[in-house]
Image (cartoon, rainbow, N blue to C red):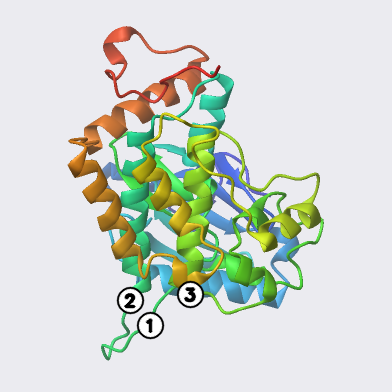
Amino acid sequence: MDAPGTRIAGKYELVEVAGSGGMATVWRAVQHGSAGFQRPVAIKRIKEHVAQESSFVRMFVEEARVCAQLVHPNIVQVHDFGDEGGRYFLVMEWIDGLSLAQFLQIADELDTFAVWPLVAAVAIEALRGLEAAHDRVDEEGNPAPVFHRDVTPHNILLGKNGLVKLTDFGLARAMDRARITEPNVIKGKVGYLAPEMTKARQPTAQTDIYALGVVLWQALAGAPLFGGHDNIEIFRKASRGEVPPVAEPRPDVPQRFANIVERALARDPVDRFESAQQMRRVIANMLWDRDVRPEAAFLGRCVTQVCHYRDHGTMPPPSYRPGSRGPGPQGRA
């Protein structure tokens, strides 16, 4: 049984659980080396009850193999992979911050919305990561794209240093349409599926773009795009792909940005952006034309502020708060 203080492979000391899903648990850990060397890492360890299920194990191994080849600043990097006690583990870089899901949850607790420049900044960086995955080539230089298939707020990490990173590539492939509405699948996850994916189509760059569009709509609106009492209801809403205008919950969002989000959410894939790169450039041009420059330092201050609230239950002193472009902007009416 894993517990704080447990050492894996003799050098990775588990500190605390950072997250847990149906198939694996992510720990904050410390890597120990010679001469007192230490560095923080994240350990993703397959759960005991699925360690004997070959389909899940294959997906976990595939995640490690693929992620090790995705070297990019906006993708969580893999440091090591191993097997101990019949259970595989994946060693990844530790992101000191929180997920976009946690950020939005705290914004909701504070009865505020995330300011749209921050949402746009997160979108640009997430799109950089998707672009690198979609444009991947193999050792011979042949196209070998990797489609995330699980772009959700939980899988977009925000660092206190202002960096945005995608995580959890590969493992989501285990969730095919035959299992997507089962009770053990996380509620709401199906709400990020592109309409064509509810019909068992093959993933493309446009399916990841659609999922990111759902994330952006949710980040701006402060509520899920497709809600429901259970996965089946959410699945049906996602399959219809009916998207209310962003302006309804957020009239302060520039129409040009709202149009970008709604284009990413087009029901027909051909009406979406052709690539993550194209969508990223359109958002960047929109910000440039409005003379908005949400740099990494701005995002880092926002994340630090929200992390302080998460850890202490209060907002940080004014000297630590971001300026007029902070994360907690307009209170809700």
Q: What's the residue at 60%, 77% (across, down)?
A: 58
Q: What's the residue at 59%, 45% (across, down)?
A: 244
Q: Secondary structure at mark 3?
A: loop
Q: What's the residue at 53%, 46% (across, down)?
A: 154
Q: Given the image, on which type of amino acid does mark 3 rest?
A: Thr
Residue picked out by circle 1: 144
Q: Count neighbours of disc 1 (C-alpha within 10 A) and say few if under 14, some if 14 to 19, many if 20 or more.
A: few
Total numbered circles: 3
Per the rendering, the mark at residue 136 is: 2
Task: Please indicate whether residue 140 sits to the left or right of residue 250 in the image.
Answer: left
Residue 63 image point, x, y percent: 50, 69
Q: Is there CB contact under 8 Å for labels 1 and 3?
A: no
Q: Given the image, on which type of amino acid does mark 2 rest?
A: Arg
Residue 231 image point, x, y percent: 77, 54
Q: Earlier in the sequence, mark 2 or mark 1?
A: 2
Q: In the rendered view, would you say 303 is above or below 58?
A: above
Q: Is there CB contact under 8 Å for labels 2 and 1?
A: yes
Q: Given the image, on which type of amino acid does mark 1 rest?
A: Ala
Asked whether residue 147 is in view, the answer is no
Residue picked out by circle 3: 204
The image quadrant of residue 96 is top left
Q: Count neighbours of disc 3 (C-alpha within 10 A) and say few if under 14, some if 14 to 19, many if 20 or more.
A: some
Task: Quote the CA–CA distance across marks 3 and 2.
Answer: 13 Å
